[in-house]
């Protein structure tokens, strides 16, 4: 099993953000492992261990807990309930996790979160931005709003939010059953091995450059790496496209790696 799979499921991100509006700022709790992050990383429990009443107990995804129940907060969220109902596998902890602008989750691994161990963590981005960078096993994974991803978080991973808006994910711990096995087998790696994810603003900008000789000449004059990336970001923005320097850097690194691996 690969360390990342984008499932075929898609959810309405705008409707999920409507559920966010039904929740109070006071419902969010700071993550309980402060040494794992810098800035602000907060959690809101939608399913929690049965009998848990303390906020920290409610947001802790205890792998040894046998029974999880919906929290009163989930009752306020019809769209999140529909998302969870679409997952035909046993669900344990379900949380909303918010990484504020300028915050970072430091490199770490969650030893018990792997398909091979029978427990899969699924991420559904509710709100994000192009300057969020999630790195798993040394390579970036781009998760877009409304998608559903399995990530093997028993491997080393980190997240940085360099954008101006919150990154909010619906994070679901599921037990592996035949339905989930089938979903993972039918999913894809989300373009992880491709040079640029098809349909992204970076792909659209690449097509624009290929059709515009003057833009090609302009970018060719930017012989410094940092100047080139800044030039791409600026030119893309002028065309109404949102491209982050991290996306450009990752695409350039993948292209270089493929070139190095080609037979001579």
Image (cartoon, rainbow, N blue to C red):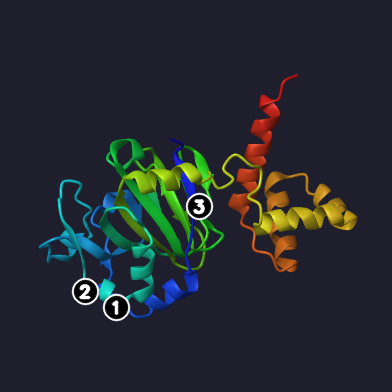
Most foreground residue, 72 or 158: 72
Neighbours of disc 2 within 10 Å: few (<14), some (14-19), many (20+)? few
- Closer to the chain start, of discs 3 and 2, is 2
According to the image, label 2 marks what residue?
A: 72
Residue density around tag 3, few if under 14, some if 14–19, many if 20 or more, within 10 Å: many
Identify residue for label 3.
133
Residue 157 is situated, as x and y percent measured from the top left of the image, at 41, 43
- For disc 1, the neighbor class at 10 Å (few under 14, some 14 to 19, many from 20) is some
The image quadrant that residue 137 belongs to is top left
Quadrant location of the C terminus in the rendered image: top right
Picture residue at 63% right of the left edge, 50% below the top: 197
Does 215 sit left or right of 166 as displayed? right
Distance from the alpha carbon under mark 1 to that under mark 2? 7 Å
**In the figure, is residue 53 to the left or right of 143?**
left
Q: Secondary structure at mark 3?
A: strand
Q: Quadrant where the N terminus lies? A: top left
Q: Residue furthest left?
A: 51
- The residue lying at 27 percent from left, 53 percent from top is 90
> Who is closer to the viewer here, 253 or 154?
154
Circle 1 residue? 76
Q: Position of residue 46 (x, y in %)?
A: 27, 66
Residue 93 position within the rendered picture, expressed as x and y whole percent measured from the top left: 25, 57
Q: Residue at position x 20%, y 47% from top? A: 63
Q: For the residues marked 3 and 1, what is the alpha-carbon distance in whole angstroms?
A: 30 Å
Q: Is residue 41 visible?
A: no
Local secondary structure at mark 2: loop
- Is 83 placed above or below 132 here? below
Instruction: Give the mark toward the camera: 3 or 1.
Output: 1
């Amino acid at each position: 099993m690969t360390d990342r799979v984008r499932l075929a499921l898609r959810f309405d991100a705008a409707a999920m953000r409507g559920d966010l509006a039904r929740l109070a700022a006071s419902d969010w709790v700071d993550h309980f492992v402060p040494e794992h992050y810098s800035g602000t990383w907060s959690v809101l429990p939608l399913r929690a261990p049965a009998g848990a009443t303390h906020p920290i107990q409610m947001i802790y995804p205890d792998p040894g807990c046998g029974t999880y129940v919906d929290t009163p907060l989930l009752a306020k969220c019809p769209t999140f309930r529909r998302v969870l109902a679409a997952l035909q596998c046993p669900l344990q902890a379900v949380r909303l996790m918010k990484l504020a602008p300028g915050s970072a989750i430091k490199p770490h691994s969650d030893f018990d979160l792997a398909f091979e161990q029978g427990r899969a963590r699924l991420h559904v981005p509710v709100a994000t931005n192009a300057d969020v960078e999630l790195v798993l096993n040394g390579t970036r994974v781009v998760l877009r709003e409304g998608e559903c991803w399995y990530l093997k978080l028993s491997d080393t991973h980190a997240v940085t939010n360099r954008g101006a808006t919150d990154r909010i994910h619906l994070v679901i711990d599921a037990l592996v059953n035949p339905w989930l096995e089938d979903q993972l087998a039918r999913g894809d790696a989300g373009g992880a091995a491709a040079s640029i994810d098809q349909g992204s603003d970076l792909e659209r900008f690449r097509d624009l450059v290929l059709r515009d000789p003057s833009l090609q000449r302009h970018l060719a004059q930017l012989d410094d790496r940092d100047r080139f990336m800044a030039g791409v970001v600026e030119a893309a923005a002028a065309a109404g496209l949102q491209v982050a320097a991290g996306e450009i850097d990752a695409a350039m690194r993948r292209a270089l790696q493929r070139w190095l691996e080609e037979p001579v």
